[in-house]
Image: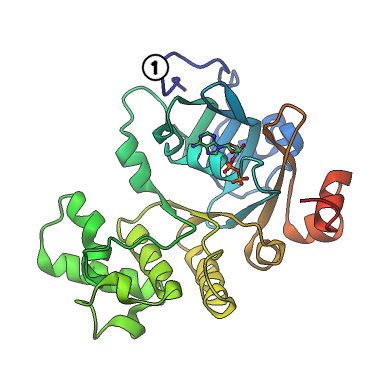
């Protein structure tokens, strides 16, 4: 992977002699840094190898290796500041928006290195969409225009195709029934929970492969939160979902795999344990995970 700031080639070379995608789940690479291999036969959507991230001289994420299964929900938990957000922002090349940001290691999505020379970061961000903590509909746009924004960016001009995709995306985001008669109203006139579902509809309208969600419920009330959680389970049938959450119950409810990150002595986030949530929350292998889930810190 090229250094995003300087264009230099990687400090951390890709592992030699890579196996084909299907057989990689059981490889030694999948077990590095506390990572548990995915169950056999699970296809890998994102393969992150020894990923580190810096803000200038500050190391925020230290050498995290994870395979993220396709059509699943993967949750990242851990105390505030341990690098969860930074790590997932490496997955769609958003980390490089920060001044002097740098990424090391390798990230492949469907077997393609997203930092390879010639890769268009805008295209990466379309294939790997992101939903943020605070719902952020485009303030001057209607509900329909918000969902259509990415389609127009992709060059789709047909009004009927746009209308169809707006409808299908709003349906997938479980918002259609609530807004179908109000499509011309401003997106920001909706409630917080509806705005977040609108942002999810906007993200999936461009048919990404992966949807990253960075604490998508932390600004929402419990009812709106449960709606988004239900939605996530349904969306995982079509997309790969990666969610950062500070809510352990939420990780237990929605995720197929849970990763616990913790800041190390170097001040950067490390992966401590990566396993199915029932194991993480009832039978943690690492004392630090146990201390965290039992509320001893964080
Ligand atoms: P988390 O999502 O686990 O709360 P973050 O990824 O937001 O953690 O932050 C990890 C570390 O990186 C923190 O020390 C934070 O202060 C730092 N950090 C985050 N964003 C920036 C930024 N834009 N510039 C400099 N440091 C940052």
Q: Secondary structure at mark 1?
A: loop
Can you say whether 73 is above or below 38 in the image? Answer: below
Can you say whether 37 is above or below 245 in the image? Answer: above
Residue at 55 percent of width and 68 percent of height: 233
Residue 279 appears anywhere in the view: no
- Is 55 situated left or right of 202 in this image? right
Residue annotated with mark 1: 7
Q: How is the image coloured?
A: rainbow
Of the pair 243 and 99, the residue shown nearer to us: 99
Residue 197 percent across, percent down from the top left? 41, 70
Residue at 46 percent of width and 36 percent of height: 95
Residue at 81 percent of width and 51 percent of height: 297
Residue 148 percent across, percent down from the top left? 22, 62
Residue 135 percent across, percent down from the top left? 42, 63
Of the pair 193 and 272, the residue shown nearer to us: 193
Of the pair 35 and 99, the residue shown nearer to us: 99
- Is 129 situated left or right of 14 in this image? left
Of the pair 297 and 202, the residue shown nearer to us: 297
Classify mark 1 as within 8 Å of ligand 1 or not, answering yes or no.
no
- Is 268 situated left or right of 144 in this image? right
Question: Where ligand 1 lies, by image quadrant?
Answer: top right
Residue at 37 percent of width and 60 percent of height: 136
Q: Which of the 4 image quarters holds residue 192?
A: bottom left
């Amino acid at each position: 992977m090229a250094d995003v700031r300087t264009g230099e080639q990687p400090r951390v070379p890709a592992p030699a002699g890579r196996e084909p995608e299907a057989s990689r789940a059981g490889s030694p690479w999948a077990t590095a840094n506390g990572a548990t291999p995915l169950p056999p036969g699970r296809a890998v959507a994102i393969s992150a190898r020894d990923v580190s991230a810096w803000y200038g001289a500050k190391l925020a994420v230290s050498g995290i290796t994870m395979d993220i299964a396709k059509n699943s929900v993967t949750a990242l938990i851990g105390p505030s500041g341990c690098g969860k957000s930074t790590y997932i922002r490496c997955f769609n090349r958003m980390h490089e928006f920060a001044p002097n940001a740098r990424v090391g290691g390798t990230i492949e999505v469907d077997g393609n290195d997203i930092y390879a020379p010639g890769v268009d970061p805008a295209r990466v961000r379309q294939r790997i969409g992101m939903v943020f903590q605070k719902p952020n509909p485009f303030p001057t746009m209607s509900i329909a225009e918000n969902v259509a924004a990415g389609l127009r960016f992709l060059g789709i001009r047909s009004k009927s195709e746009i209308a169809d995709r707006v409808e299908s995306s709003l349906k997938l985001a479980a918002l259609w029934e609530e807004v179908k008669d109000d499509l011309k109203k401003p997106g920001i006139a909706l409630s917080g929970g509806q705005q977040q579902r609108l942002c999810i509809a906007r993200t999936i309208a461009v048919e990404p492969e992966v949807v990253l969600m960075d604490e998508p419920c932390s600004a929402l009330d419990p009812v709106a939160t449960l709606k988004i959680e239900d939605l996530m389970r349904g969306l995982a049938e079509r997309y790969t979902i990666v969610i950062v959450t500070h809510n352990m119950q939420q990780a237990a409810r929605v995720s197929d795999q849970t990763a616990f990150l913790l800041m190390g002595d170097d001040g950067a986030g490390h992966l401590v344990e990566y396993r199915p949530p029932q194991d993480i929350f009832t039978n943690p292998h690492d004392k630090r995970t146990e201390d965290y889930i039992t509320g001893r810190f964080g």
